[in-house]
Amino acid sequence: MPEVGQEGLERLQSAHVVVVGVGGVGGAAAYYLAKQGVGYLRLIDQDIIEPSNLHRLHGATREHLYHPKADVAAESLARDNPWTHAESIVDTLRTSNVQQLLSGCDLIVDGLDNFRTRYVLNQYSRDTETPYLFASAIAHQGHLALFNPPETACLDCLMPNVVDRDDESCENLGVAAATVGLVGAIAASQASNFILASHSNLKEHLLTFDTMTLDFVLTPIPKRAGCETCSNSRAKINQRSETVTVLCGGKSADVLPDHPLGLDLQRVSHSIPNDLLLAKSETVLVYKMGDLLISLFRTGRMRIEGVRGRERALEAAKVVWELATTPVAQEA
Ligand SMILES: [Zn+2]
């Protein structure tokens, strides 16, 4: 392509892009970013692949069930794109680790499903002047914008104080696989344009489209007077140090320990009967505990499926932590 050329390819090769959330949108974005020649991709996702999201994940098969999304995506990209170095990070991005996880990246691509974490990205983008490509898909609709504060408006200017609500989640409204793929592909194309020419029509604009009606609308985003992020008046985003986060649909929860536990998952797996163990890797252990499905990560963080309410989730987590930190008697 004449507008890329050798110089453009070199620019793409030297770019460092981080994709936060490697589900349907982030996975598709990472796929095309690699195909377009981006030299370094950092893929961050805390989740494992579940049967209900297999339909929208690029490069994931049934064999990848219960493996971390970030690891599966990075392996697939490394296998097919020798010009791209793909690094996976299986962790929850939050205010306390955002500097560490995003450092050295030239551009952030958002593949998230919640605003809580998006505001953390937005604040980081403002603080470090790192461009932030917001992307989201729900039902048949896609939304994208490229923020580069302080030059442009930020996410907080456009959508202040959005609270994640279950009734508006992908679990309850559903999400079409092709819509997710299109959002990811547009995100990758605009990220590449920005890397090549420091320009994209998404800059300072919100793109909204609907794959049912085929309406595509590009709306300018002005800076909002009084935006706390832009004016830097918010001392720091409230570090939501909540231990338990009830997720999408209210039937699963994410539980964080007070401090990272550094578990030896290999050892923990010995205390779980084989017929209950669904998957085991260096980063995650997935097993059944009664009616619950537990995904236990090295840090002690866990995803609990089939649980309702904070209290129940925390009770279950305490049982898991107890099991995981108790030495196995007479271990060989
Ligand atoms: Zn703002």
Image (cartoon, helix red, strand yellow):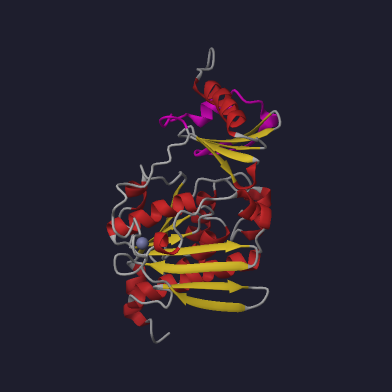
Which residue corresponds to the image point at 48% horizontal and 32% vertical from the top-left? Answer: 300
- Image-based side of 275 in relation to 22, left or right: right
Which residue corresponds to the image point at 54% horizontal and 77% vertical from the top-left? Answer: 217
- Image-based side of 162 in relation to 277, left or right: left
| Figure quadrant, ligand 1 | bottom left
Across and down, in percent, residue 118 comes to 45, 54
Q: Residue furthest bottom?
A: 2
- Image-based side of 106 in relation to 215, left or right: left
Q: Quadrant of residue 182?
A: bottom right
- Pick whichever, 100 or 224, lies toward us: 224
Quarter that holds the N terminus? bottom left
Across and down, in percent, residue 121 comes to 39, 54
Is residue 284 located in the magenta-colored stretch of the structure?
A: yes
Q: Residue furthest front?
A: 226
- Pick whichever, 29 or 59, lies toward us: 29
Q: Is residue 34 above or below residue 267?
A: below
Q: Residue furthest top?
A: 330
Q: Is residue 99 above or below residue 315?
A: below
Across and down, in percent, residue 329 comes to 54, 13
**Is residue 195 something one can see in this rendering?**
yes
Q: Is residue 176 above or below residue 283?
A: below
Q: Quadrant of residue 289?
A: top right
- Image-based side of 289 in relation to 280, left or right: right
Write the start and end of the magenta stretch as one range. Answer: 257-285
Is residue 19 located in the magenta-colored stretch of the structure?
A: no
- Pick whichever, 75 or 300, lies toward us: 300
Q: Is residue 154 above or below residue 247?
A: below
**Is residue 61 something one can see in this rendering?**
no
Which residue corresponds to the image point at 32% horizontal and 65% vertical from the top-left? Answer: 149
Across and down, in percent, residue 56 comes to 63, 60
